[in-house]
Image (cartoon, rainbow, N blue to C red):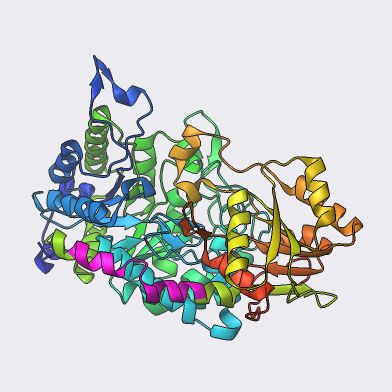
């Protein structure tokens, strides 16, 4: 059913209010038991691609407010539409009958949950930042509009985007190219344009990560970062994008950061291991209520970042974490407890009972909980969320819309407009390739080698000879021979290493704590030095955060930045992605590099 305005005004029971304040993670679920042992005692890795009865029942029973989807929940367009419609049907059967927030991380670029060959993922925020001087807010608006259209077609109504962190730290392991750049005013303009692009097209946006994750050198998935800015720096650097967008647009949601900000709140808590620590922003009443609500005037829904991240889970038991976030003034707890097997359903019951008791006890303010639930209901009403859905019509529409020709065209245009020429000595670019020119490509892995090779072949009629070095592993003697025989060397690097957010989250770290790609910089530097000694024409390409140009740029006769290396097509016949196609066009002189660095690199800007 569509949300009735009367719900937003009518009194919900306390239990119903609390159920609306939970956003559950249904990434994996194992229903079966082995003998008397609950399979949850093992590691459950059965993706939820259809809705198990257990999970449908808890949504109905507890009037749950929303869910978050991951890549594992998405196999095909028909499948995910059916899953989302079944989730809404379960919500329709609840006492309130209110529709769910169905949410996802589809920022574009590094963070995209919909398979790249299915949906349009774009090349990300820093590539948008690189286009600003030439194109203004065009690509921010267009990319958000297209992502919103595709999400809505799948039944997703909340996107955890845009990221409006101002990336001030070259060593930031988790934000970097997820930021538009280092200029707070630029970030505010482009972030505001994306909020409009999402929300004018029916998808609720969620600014993140308040009050700013841009100057950290710790990933809050793996630790608890601390920002030591004074108040003046915070107001000049971290807060302006949030302040401006709140003032002009009042976005539907804002997501908190699991980060300590002593200048904003130096009050402490005692961790579950007995250590006294400064409160993270997610649990700080001074930051969430006094600053965000009262001083900045934000009236919308505040949601936590995932509560299973180490920045919270290493220091708090799950139920205590939820109580602390609600006490700070947060509206929605994202991923409050892990639900992986039937035994976890009892933990959810315990959580809700405990929250109810904390309200009755006065630890949580009953009026604030009620006001919070009202904000949630009003947001659902504003976006006209509904549980009345037609699977067949939705599937037909989505199959035509997702990744359609026009969407891919805009994606390709952004990728090309972002390519930035940082250096071009000896008239190296464009490359003048004759018949049988030997091109040696150095890449982080062989798939990226093949993607660039394919893109070059697609954009020239000249017969070329290729060889490849993968930095994941290579034989030094044969590589040295290929370097010496090459006419042109194109060497690329992707740094920093992957963060958990790119591949999904904390479950990936649990599966493989060392999942991030190995540091390849020493091997790359050695190869670039050999190329320079051999006097080879060399192009260095920064594939992700362009800060690596400070280390490797001196070895290249020409230096380019792409900000992305998405591969959208990966079959036996073809490996391709928009960033590689754009890179090939610039290398061959088919298009100019008009992007501008949105961050400073050793004085280059």
Q: From the top left corner, tell me how far across and down residue 224 is, in percent.
A: 55, 44
Q: Is residue 501 left or right of residue 405?
A: right
Query: Would you identify the image quadrant in which residue 539 lies?
Result: bottom right
The quadrant in which the C terminus is found is bottom right
Residue appearing at x 47%, y 72% in the figure: 411
Q: Main secondary structure of the magenta part?
A: helix
Residue appearing at x 28%, y 71% in the figure: 202
**Stretch of the chain drawn in magenta:** 394-412
The quadrant in which the N terminus is found is bottom left
Q: Is residue 288 magenta?
A: no
Query: Would you identify the image quadrant in which residue 329 lies?
Result: bottom left
For the residue pair 509 and 319, the one nearer the viewer reads as 509
Q: Is residue 281 left or right of residue 176?
A: left
Q: From the top left corner, tell me how far across and down residue 389 is, in percent.
A: 13, 61
- Placement of 121 over or under 443, stated as above or below: below
Q: From the top left corner, tell me how far across and down residue 456 is, in percent.
A: 63, 67
- Placement of 25 over or under 99, stated as above or below: above
């Amino acid at each position: 059913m569509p949300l009735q305005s009367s719900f937003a005004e009518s009194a919900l029971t306390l239990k119903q209010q609390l159920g609306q304040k939970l956003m559950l993670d249904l990434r994996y679920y194992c229903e079966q038991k082995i003998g008397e042992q609950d399979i949850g005692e093992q590691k459950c890795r059965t993706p939820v691609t259809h809705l198990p009865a257990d999970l449908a029942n808890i949504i109905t029973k507890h009037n749950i407010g929303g869910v978050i989807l991951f890549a594992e929940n998405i196999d095909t367009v028909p499948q995910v539409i059916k899953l989302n419609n079944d989730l809404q049907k379960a919500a329709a059967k609840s006492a309130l009958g209110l529709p769910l927030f169905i949410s996802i991380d589809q920022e574009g670029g590094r963070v995209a949950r919909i398979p790249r060959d299915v949906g349009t993922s774009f090349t990300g925020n820093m590539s948008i930042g690189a286009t600003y001087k030439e194109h203004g807010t065009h690509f921010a608006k267009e990319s958000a509009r297209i992502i919103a259209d595709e999400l809505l077609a799948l039944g997703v109504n909340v996107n955890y985007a845009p990221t409006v962190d101002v990336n001030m730290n070259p060593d930031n392991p988790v934000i970097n190219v997820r930021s538009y750049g280092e200029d707070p005013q630029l970030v505010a303009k482009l972030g505001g344009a994306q909020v409009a692009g999402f929300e004018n097209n029916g998808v609720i946006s969620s600014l993140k990560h308040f009050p700013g994750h841009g100057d950290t050198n710790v990933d809050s998935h793996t630790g608890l970062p601390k920002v030591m800015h004074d108040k003046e720096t915070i107001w000049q650097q971290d807060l302006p994008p949030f302040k401006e967008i709140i003032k002009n647009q009042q976005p539907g949601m804002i997501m908190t950061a699991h980060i300590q900000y002593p200048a904003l709140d130096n009050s402490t808590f005692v961790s579950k291991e007995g250590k006294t620590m400064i409160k993270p922003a997610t649990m700080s009443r001074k930051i969430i209520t006094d600053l965000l609500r009262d001083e900045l005037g934000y009236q919308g829904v505040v949601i936590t970042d995932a509560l299973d991240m180490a920045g919270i889970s290493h220091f708090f038991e799950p139920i205590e974490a939820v109580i602390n976030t609600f006490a700070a003034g947060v509206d929605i707890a994202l991923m409050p407890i892990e639900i992986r097997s039937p035994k976890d359903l009892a933990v959810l019951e315990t959580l809700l009972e405990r929250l109810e008791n904390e309200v009755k006890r006065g630890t949580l303010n009953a009026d604030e909980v009620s006001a919070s639930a009202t904000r949630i209901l009003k947001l659902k009403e504003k976006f006209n969320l509904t549980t009345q859905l037609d699977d067949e019509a939705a599937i037909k529409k989505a199959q035509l819309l997702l990744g359609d020709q026009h969407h891919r065209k805009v994606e390709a245009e952004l990728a090309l407009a972002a390519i930035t020429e940082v250096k071009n000595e000896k008239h190296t670019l464009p490359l003048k390739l004759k018949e049988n020119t030997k091109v040696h490509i150095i890449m982080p892995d062989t798939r990226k080698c093949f993607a660039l090779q394919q893109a070059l072949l697609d954009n020239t009629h000249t017969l070329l000879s290729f060889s490849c070095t993968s930095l994941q592993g290579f034989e030094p003697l044969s590589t040295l021979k290929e370097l010496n025989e090459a006419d042109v060397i194109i060497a690329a690097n992707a740094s920093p290493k992957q963060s958990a957010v790119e591949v999904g989250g904390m479950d990936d770290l649990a599966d493989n704590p060392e999942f991030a790609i190995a540091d390849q910089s020493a091997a790359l530097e050695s190869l670039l030095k050999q190329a320079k000694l051999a006097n080879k024409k060399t192009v260095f390409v920064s594939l992700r955060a362009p800060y690596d140009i400070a280390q490797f740029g001196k070895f290249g006769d020409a230096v380019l930045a792409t900000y992305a290396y998405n591969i959208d097509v990966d079959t036996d016949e073809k490996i391709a992605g928009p960033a590689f196609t754009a890179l090939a066009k610039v290398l061959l002189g088919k298009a100019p590099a008009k992007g501008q660095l949105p961050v400073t690199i050793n004085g280059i800007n």
